[in-house]
Structures are given as structure tokens and as C-alpha cells.
Image (cartoon, rainbow, N blue to C red):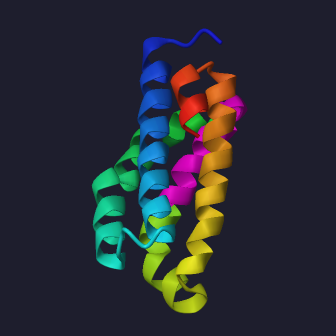
Amino acid sequence: MGLNPADQEMVKDITRMGVRAGVLLRGVMLQKVDEETLRWGLRELAPGDMMGRYMPVLRNHPEYVQLLNILHLIFSLEGQLDFQIQEYGFDSLKDDLQEINFSLQQVGEQFDLQELAQTV
């Protein structure tokens, strides 16, 4: 799929954020990342900034649905982390990890990102 440079940057930014979030969540599952580190890591990913930057493009291009899903999952996770952990426990983060990984896999195939397909 031929992308203009701005869209290529968006794909890379959101994909990179998804991979990093996946690493954090995998760390939680393996009990290598604690709640404080997870919270810090999600904040560092700045999903709100990316949401503001890329939402207008994502909203108008249904072919980017998997990118939107990754962005929205991480944005929601950062904003609702306390509630989710308190209400459902750390195990509930496994569902987010699976969803992010699935969307990353779809993005990797859609945009022919070989290195991503091998990572996820």
C-alpha cells in the first residue's frame, strides 16, 4: 500500500507505541513490571498526544481501523488503569495485550511491515 510520508510516519508512530505497550504489558504478565512502572511507561508513550495528532486522519480513513484500535486501547488503558486494576485485577491486562498484539499483526500485514510481523 503506497502511503504518503505523513501517513507513513503515523503508521510507524502508532505501531511503535503499540509494540512498546505490548512489551510493558508482557512484562506485567511475567511479573517483571510493577504497577508504578506500567503507569510511568504508559504515560511516557503519550497516547493523548498521538490521539490529538492522528485522530482527524484516522477518523476519515476506515482502512486505518487497526491503527485506531491500537491508539484507542492504549489511550483508554492509560486513562482507566486504576479502575481496571481495582475492578478486574492485573489479569485483565492480558486481554489488552492480546488485542494490541492482534491489531499489530494486522497492521504488519496490511502495511507489509516485515519486522513487525516477526516481532508479534
SS majority, magenta = helix
* Vertical position of residue 24 compared to residue 11: above or below: below
Residue 81 in sight from this viewpoint:
yes
Viewport quadrant of the N terminus: top right
Q: Position of residue 8 (x, y in %)?
A: 48, 20
| Residue at 40 percent of width and 45 percent of height | 50
Q: Residue reaching furthest bottom?
A: 86
Viewport quadrant of the C terminus: top right
* Vertical position of residue 82 compared to residue 120: above or below: below
Q: Position of residue 3 (x, y in %)?
A: 55, 13
Q: Position of residue 85 (x, y in %)?
A: 50, 84
| Residue at 62 percent of width and 29 percent of height | 108
Where residue 109 sits, quadrant-wise, is: top right
Nearer the observer, 23 or 49: 23
Boundaries of the magenta span: 61-75
Nearer the observer, 64 or 53: 64
The reply to whether the magenta stretch includes residue 29 is no
Q: Residue reaching furthest top?
A: 2
